[in-house]
Amino acid sequence: MIKLAVDAMGGDYAPQSVVEGVKLARNSRDDIEFLLFGDEKQIKPLLKDEKNIKIIHADEVITMEDEPVRAVKRKKNSSLVLAAKAVKDGKADALVSIGNTGALLVASLLIIGRIKGIDRPGFTATMPVMNNDKGFTMVDAGANADAKVTNIEQYALLGKYYSELVGHVNNPRIGLINNGTEADKGDMIHRKMHDALQSMNANGEINFIGNIESRELLNGVADVVVTDGFTGNAVLKAIEGTAMSGLGLLKESIKNGGFKAKLGAFLMKDSLKKMAKKMDYKRYGGAVLLGIKDPVVKGHGNSDAKTVKNCLFNAAEIVKSGYVESAKNHFTKVAETK
Amino acid sequence: MIKLAVDAMGGDYAPQSVVEGVKLARNSRDDIEFLLFGDEKQIKPLLKDEKNIKIIHADEVITMEDEPVRAVKRKKNSSLVLAAKAVKDGKADALVSIGNTGALLVASLLIIGRIKGIDRPGFTATMPVMNNDKGFTMVDAGANADAKVTNIEQYALLGKYYSELVGHVNNPRIGLINNGTEADKGDMIHRKMHDALQSMNANGEINFIGNIESRELLNGVADVVVTDGFTGNAVLKAIEGTAMSGLGLLKESIKNGGFKAKLGAFLMKDSLKKMAKKMDYKRYGGAVLLGIKDPVVKGHGNSDAKTVKNCLFNAAEIVKSGYVESAKNHFTKVAETK
């Protein structure tokens, strides 16, 4: 039985969307036990059937407005802190939240702790790719805006194990986002990052394919895309905004296009739906915080039940995959040879 | 008469696409004289009618593979260097090229020169916005990857004058790309950039609306978007790649969608065309190098004749607008009060 510690009080529609997501997940699988941390009075009425679900009451809630470090240190009985402690104490295998991102990061760092050898954890983002169903995984999607060269080296390794074990990609192609594909492109720090990854490639540690441009991401140019958290965040939001704008533009064109366009859209409905589905990042199971001793999954604050379900399934897959163990082994070996 | 110095030998299909673009432009306007720099033997056969077009022969060509600084210093008789000299000497009002970007940057810096008070020039990019036809202007789109805080202050001012005089935007809203809208967001350098722009706002120098996220760019959240050249480049390429992928996905869905989808697409043709047109960055007249003493416009290397025409018209608009004079005046005044 996989045990997931779920912060039921995070997100814009808490606890409803979280509880509904847990119910969806529970109804379609039997191999997960859900530990739901939050206000029992609010959660219980939402559950008719508590099969494989255990409510652990939490007095306090960390809100989106709370300052992360202070909140985690002071709100000892918050749903997030108690959920993180359950993971730390081995009572659960992974942590899932759609609440305050900064607080989740701090709780993961201070309570669950980093893998030995990792300086700063990084968030993944998994995005669709046009010509296959695997998509690509970006690290760091925004946990660490001021990334140093050593952070990028660690993200490349964490991303490699994640892609191999969770994404089932053989010898994943790792690329660095830069403002040109040539080896000498970029600002000072990205040139250094390129050279460091190049050396790791020469050592056989990773399969580094060199610099990649953000224009090529959705064409599947790499399986793992490493980048500093500032650039990663900006690129992901640009992709998201453009996809949303494109769909909006299409809808508007149809609306203002008269009868012919409306009939056309009706006939094209299945094609358009297929496209919208591919563009829908919600399908992709949230962001995973890599570099922590146990799997931590963060969903969007505005996640609906279906997205919460995807996050929960993703967390379960990560637990089953053995990614954390592989990453730990790697960094332990590295530490021993030094 | 506006005089444009045109590098006829730049770009993937030189000189054909450049000469065709010049012809298109010349055939629809009478107020521009085109000085075409390049190989007379290749250019002349492409021109039946030389009205308002003057060919100035150039022996040499700077290719896409040439190292910019060396090429500009050594290839004294190249089409680019001679065109830049014509601008420097007052024989032309603006420089237009679709060739080697680095070489254009170097030729602009070394031959035409910076506006006094500007440390590093920045490229604009003009992108469409969903709910209006003006779009937004980004500075810097990639001329200066290692931007300092002073560079960003200068981009904000250059962008302001450009948006006011060329884009006809009244009191343009200036935003800084950051990984969150709150004032304390970002890595170290972007937090400092935010604070510097905030001070300029307090002084009444610019209308700074604060941090903006790349997700909101196409929604028209700002008229001028300032950013370091590394982030600007990554964000623009992400937008471009996503738009292209979206259109590709739509085409593919239709192709694989059978008769119904094809009929639907036929009926929706006008709507789809309208969308594709809005997404087509080629309409938007190239990138302008801000901070140089005269207007410099750079088109994509793969520009077709229509895009070259748009670049030429854009250069003519900038000359007419008086943007350069306004920027020069501002920085002269600033220098005098120091």
Image (cartoon, coloured by chain):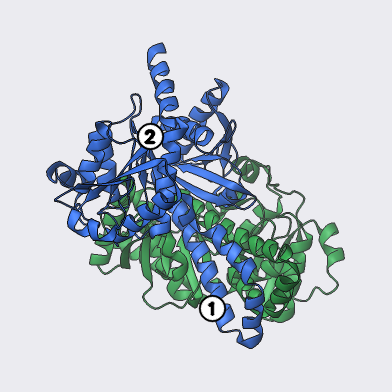
Chain colours: A green, B blue
Q: Position of residue B280 (x, y in %)?
A: 50, 59
From what the image shows, is residue B216 above or below residue B86? below
Say which residue appears at 50% left-offset and 61% top-offset: A124
The amino acid on which the numbered mark 1 sits, given as a three-letter code, is Glu
The residue wearing badge 2 is B148
| Pick the front one: A109 or B55 | B55
Q: Is residue A140 visible?
A: no
On-image quarter of the N terminus of chain A: bottom right
**Circle 1 Cα neighbour tier, 10 Å, few/some/many (<14 / 14–19 / ≥20):** few
* CA–CA distance in space, label 2 to label 1: 44 Å
- Residue at image position (73%, 69%) is A22
- Which chain is indicated by disc 2? B
Say what secondary structure mark 2 lies in: loop
Image mark for residue B252: 1
Q: Amino acid at mark 2?
A: Lys
**Quarter residue B294 falls in:** top left
Q: Which mark is residue A248?
A: none
Front residue of B138/A167: it is B138
User: Residue A186 versus residue A296: which sits nearer the camera?
Assistant: A186
Q: Please determine whether, in this image, residue B181 is positioned above or below residue B283.
A: above
Please identify the residue farthest to the top as the structure is shown. Answer: B337
